[in-house]
Image (cartoon, rainbow, N blue to C red):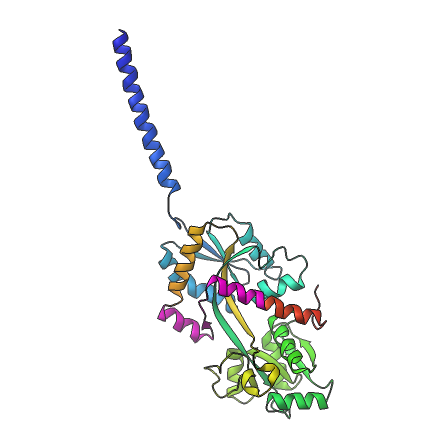
Amino acid sequence: MQGNNRCRWDAFARGFMVLLIGSTAVTSSVLAQSYPSRPIILVVPVNPGGPNDMVARLIAPPLAKALGQPVVVENRPGASQKIGIRSMLSAPKDGYTIAIVSPASMTINPLLDRAVGYDPLKDFTFLTEAVSMYYVLIANPALPAKSVKELVTYVKANPDKIAYGTGGSGTIIHFATQQVLQKLDITALPVHYKSDGPAIMDLIAGHVQIMVAYSGAAKPFIDSGKVFPLATTGPERLAELPNVANYKQTGIKALENFTTQAWVGIVAAKGIPAEATQKLNDALAKVLQLPELRKSLEAVGFQVVNSTPGEFAAIVRSGLEENRIVIESGAIKPE
């Protein structure tokens, strides 16, 4: 009798061990699933349309193919991009929520908004500065200055008679204009509009005399003679405006090493798994080299950058320092 009980016990024990081993194997398999194993959310902290949204929607399909999982673009606008950025930072730090960022969210809002709620250099995992956009300093054709040197001479001879347009106080265009004015040691009156479009229209009408504008947005008006280009802001001449000198070529020493640009980049929260960081970096690097994607981005005025995380972090750090100088001058005040 005892022998039978022992046999039954041995059989039960063997069965239990088989079940336990099988369960452990299944659990280990689930835990060991490589990243990514489900869809990734790409947060865009602004409304649909505009550079940030455009870049996200062009990059998402090839990025999904490279990662083997859907990349879902979600617009989460509001509070000067704070809602979208904070939602990404508060999501689980597993690499499945990433975000589009720009100078507004990374190098302007943290300086102007005391309640921004994040540190751009401490709270993010930098992935890539995907694209950049350069500007052109333009003038109303009636202005008797056809170069930056002539502009400086005219402004110094006619103080308080030059106004410049922006798409709003504290915008990147506002900062870009103040930066070049400070480099040139001249002043002009800022006139703020609800967006860049109305500012350009008032420049054409002569209500403001100069403006820094995105090169792609300004090109049709330059080509038609409605505005006059004084200089572009990139390190080299721009392909879309090959006959316009850049700051370095103006002959003004203060502008020799000066460039300004907008950019669109991609980040995750600090603390995501190393595997997720590596997979995202590798996929983005691969995607941004695709000829079809580069052609699509360049067709709407972007220059593909595809920076390393370290290079991207350096761009953000430099932008913060440049904008901090403008704020410390009193030209633009925090809220």
| Quadrant (top left, top right, bottom left, bottom right) of the C terminus | bottom right
Instruction: Identify the magenta region.
Output: 290-318
Indicate left or right for 163 with 230 as reference: right
Q: Can see residue 45?
A: yes
- Answer whether residue 216 is magenta in the image: no
- Give x and y (percent) for residue 180: 62, 79
Q: Quadrant of residue 168?
A: bottom right
Q: Is residue 227 visible?
A: no
181 or 207, which lies in front? 181
* Residue 294 among those drawn in magenta: yes
Q: As displayed, is residue 76 above or below residue 289?
A: above
What residue appears at the point 57 percent right and 56 percent down from the top-left corner? 122
Q: Please state the horizontal and vertical placement of residue 83, each as a whole percent of the image.
A: 59, 56
Residue 222 drawn above or below residue 86:
below
Residue 197 vertical placement versus 139 (above, below): above
Instruction: From this view, report whether residue 79 is shown above or below residue 196.
Output: above
Residue furthest to the bottom: 144
User: Which residue shows up at 69% across the image and 77% down it?
Assistant: 190
Relative placement, left or right, of 262 versus 277 is right
Identify the image quadrant of the N terminus. top left
Where in the figure is residue 152, as x and y percent of width and height?
66, 87
Q: Quadrant of residue 58?
A: bottom left
Question: Residue 230, position in %: x, y?
Answer: 57, 86
User: Magenta-highlighted stretch: main secondary structure?
Assistant: helix
Q: Nearer the viewer, residue 274 or 303?
A: 274
